Image (spheres, rainbow, N blue to C red):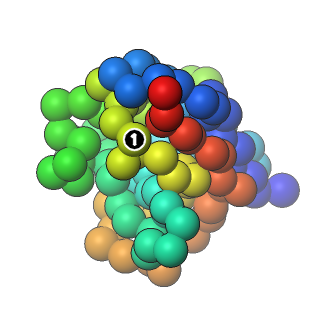
Amino acid sequence: QVQLVESGGGLVQPGGSLRLSCAASGFTLGYYAIGWFRQAPGKEREGISCMSSSTDYIYYLDSVKGRFTISRHNTKNTVYLQMNSLKPEDTAVYYCAAAPRGCRAYPGQYDYWGQGIQVTVSS
């Protein structure tokens, strides 16, 4: 059974850090690009980061550049999103998604999705 499971979310104060994990099962993560998306209440889902299967392409949304870092550990079949200097506007449900080989521009182009995990940045 193909599955992506996010973990590591929660409540953090502004300026704090969280590390999200995306664990894959039922397929080999190393053959897939992994994207991280988020969706805040009343807003569309937006892509915030992506790493290609070969790791030679990495994308960050401008608003998270310099604060978020994507990485992957293929032997653990897991991708991570390190989030530092968190801001209240980072509050959203975060999702990971997988697409064969290369990063895709649109959520509909990803084959597999996690269930999402809440990140709340508040004092």
Give the residue displayed 20% in from the left and 48% down from the top. Answer: 63
Question: For mark 1, does the 10 Å Cα neighbourhood hold few (<14), some (14 to 19), or many (20 or more) residues?
Answer: some
Q: Vertically, is 95 above or below 45?
A: above
Image check: 2 left or right of 68? Answer: right
In percent of width and height, residue 39 lies at 49, 62
Q: Which residue lies furthest to the right in this view?
A: 1
Q: Vertically, is 16 above or below 102?
A: above
Q: Name the residue under label 1.
A: 88
Give the residue displayed 57% in from the left and 53% down from the top. Answer: 93
Give the residue displayed 38% in from the left and 65% down from the top. Answer: 46
Q: Can residue 33 be seen in this view?
A: no
Q: Vertically, is 60 above or below 23?
A: below
Give the residue displayed 39% in from the left and 27% down from the top. Answer: 14
Image check: 26 left or right of 63? Answer: right
Three-letter code for the amino acid on which mark 1 is drawn = Pro
Q: Can residue 117 be seen in this view?
A: yes
Under circle 1, the secondary element is helix
Q: Residue furthest bottom?
A: 108
Image check: 48 left or right of 62? Answer: right
In percent of width and height, residue 121 lies at 48, 35
Total tally of numbered discs in the picture: 1
In percent of width and height, residue 115 lies at 71, 56
Residue 24, quarter of picture = top right
Image check: 61 left or right of 22? Answer: left
Q: Which of 83 and 1 is in front in this view?
A: 83
Q: Nearer the viewer, residue 83 or 50?
A: 83
Classify the position of the N terminus by image quarter: bottom right
Q: Which residue lies furthest to the top in this view?
A: 16
